[in-house]
Image (spheres, grey):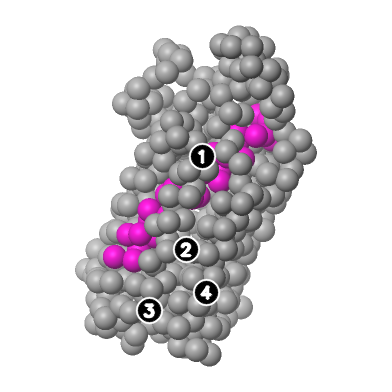
């Protein structure tokens, strides 16, 4: 290491307050990432039959676009972390926004549902690269004891953006038509995100390398995390993949929970709008019910992430799985806007408990030298849950002939997965369970 390298690393201070300007830029970025996926959430499935030619009750065809999204986003998460450790976070973020440019145009000109599926493939590329980078960048520049708060704020911003986009595009579709409304909203969002990235976002990889150097030299402060044993300074992608997926019991328990919780989001994306419109709600009112799920999920992460910095990750994660599943089951027990809104809020709160804290738990026990890769692999399995969950939803609804069975499929899956996490997981917070 040269003297200039040592000086540069000494100048890189970690912490939210010390890096507040860049932290805020990254929060704006993830809100725009939420806008991009949110524009495809309410209007597209609700109008799939009337606007895009999906035959009535074609559940497998309806779920195809979410299956495609999950497979692509999962794959891009897998490579995004490793790629960013070689070329930097900012370049990967820009690649993600480049993939989003054709999406609004494809939706506007779509002659059939196949175009929507193709647009969702590009959406998976966009989300896999951009959301991964906003999360990694914030973790790079903050301190270990701020990880719960950091990821909570990241997911708050993203999912509030998602909820707002669902509501705004529902009103735009009602006023201007689905295609025109989505085109205007999408082009404004992607243009703004690209411009802000070019002008104001910094690459945060030097902060991650600085932290790794301090850990290696023994100069790290605070309680020692329970890192997995037997990993070198530069493990291969195969070694990290095996560790996160099955070799380390704690990481495997977290990963399966991440995969299954995406069943809920796939259900909300595909079948909530169909279910609510069939029960007589207008498109804007459907947007509000789905939006309540997103608002509660996003807004609650203001404190659920920070809560885990004090009480630990394990309890909030397990209870989040069970509460979220209970909210899904509640949707079927009664009718009416108020009840459906309450049920959506319960699921959203469960998501807020588990979502930032599963990621924080992975970050807790992943060495900074390969943390980007570990988080990318966790996110690979987690977002593969979109594809697996949507496929399960389509099969369940197809053979039962009703979307109600899909709700029960998800609720039971969440109950079982939460139990597995409770048994095989453990507390990962370094202060509460140090090495």
In the rendered picture of this protein, how many numbered marks are placed on residues? 4
Give residue 192's quadrant in the image: bottom right
Q: Position of residue 348 (x, y in %)?
A: 57, 60
Residue 292 forms part of the magenta stretch: no
Give the left or right position of residue 389, taking residue 217 as reference. left
Mark 3 and mark 4 in contact? Answer it, CB < 8 Å.
no
Which residue matches tag 3?
A: 108
**Between discs 2 and 3, the one toward the N terminus:** 2
Give the number of the disc on residue 89: 1
Q: Nearer the viewer, residue 422 or 48?
A: 48
Residue 332 in view in this figure: no
**In the image, what residue occupies the spot 28% across and 72% down?**
115
Which residue matches tag 4?
A: 185
Q: Nearer the viewer, mark 2 or mark 4?
A: 4
Which residue matches tag 2?
A: 37
Badge 4: residue crowd in 10 Å (few <14, some 14–19, many ≥20): some
- Circle 1 sits in a helix, a strand or a loop, which is it? helix
Q: CA distance from mark 1 to mark 4?
A: 26 Å
Q: CA distance from mark 3 to mark 1?
A: 31 Å
């Amino acid at each position: 290491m040269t003297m200039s390298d040592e000086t540069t690393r000494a100048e890189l201070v970690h912490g939210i307050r010390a890096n507040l300007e860049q932290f805020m830029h990254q929060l704006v970025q993830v809100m725009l990432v939420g806008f991009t996926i949110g524009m495809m959430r309410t209007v597209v499935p609700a109008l799939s039959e009337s606007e895009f030619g999906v035959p009535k009750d074609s559940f497998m065809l309806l779920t195809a676009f979410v299956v495609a999204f999950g497979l692509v986003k999962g794959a891009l998460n897998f490579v995004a972390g490793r790629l960013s450790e070689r070329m930097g976070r900012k370049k990967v973020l820009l690649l993600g926004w480049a993939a989003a440019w054709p999406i609004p145009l494809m939706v506007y000109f779509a002659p059939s549902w196949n175009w929507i599926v193709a647009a969702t493939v590009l959406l998976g590329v966009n989300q896999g690269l951009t959301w991964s980078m906003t999360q990694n960048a914030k973790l790079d520049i903050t301190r270990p004891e701020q990880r719960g708060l950091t990821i909570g704020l990241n997911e708050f911003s993203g999912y509030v953006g998602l909820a707002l986009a669902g509501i705004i595009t529902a009103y735009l579709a009602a006023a201007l038509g689905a295609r025109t409304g989505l085109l205007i909203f999408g082009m404004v969002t992607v243009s703004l995100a690209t411009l802000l990235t070019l002008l104001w976002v910094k690459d945060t990889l030097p902060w991650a390398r600085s932290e790794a150097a301090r850990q290696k030299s023994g100069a790290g402060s605070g309680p020692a995390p329970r890192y997995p044993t037997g990993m070198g300074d530069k493990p291969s992608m195969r070694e990290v993949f095996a560790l996160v997926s099955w070799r380390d019991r704690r990481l495997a328990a977290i990963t399966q929970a991440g995969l299954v919780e995406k069943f809920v989001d796939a259900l909300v994306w595909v079948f909530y709008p169909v279910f609510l419109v069939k029960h007589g709600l207008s498109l804007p009112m459907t947007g509000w019910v789905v939006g309540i799920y997103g608002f509660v999920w996003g807004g609650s992460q203001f404190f659920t992430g920070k809560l885990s910095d004090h009480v630990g990750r394990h309890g909030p994660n397990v209870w989040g799985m069970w509460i979220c599943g209970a909210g899904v089951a509640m949707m079927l027990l009664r009718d009416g806007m108020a009840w459906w809104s309450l049920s959506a809020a319960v699921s959203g709160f469960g998501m807020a408990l588990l979502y930032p804290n599963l990621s924080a738990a992975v970050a807790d026990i992943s060495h900074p030298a390969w943390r980007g890769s570990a988080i990318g692999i966790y996110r690979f399995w987690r977002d593969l849950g979109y594809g697996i969950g949507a496929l399960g939803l389509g099969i369940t609804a197809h053979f039962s002939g009703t979307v109600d069975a899909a709700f029960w499929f998800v609720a039971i899956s969440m109950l079982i997965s939460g139990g597995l996490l409770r048994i095989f997981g453990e507390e990962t917070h370094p202060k509460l369970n140090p090495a």
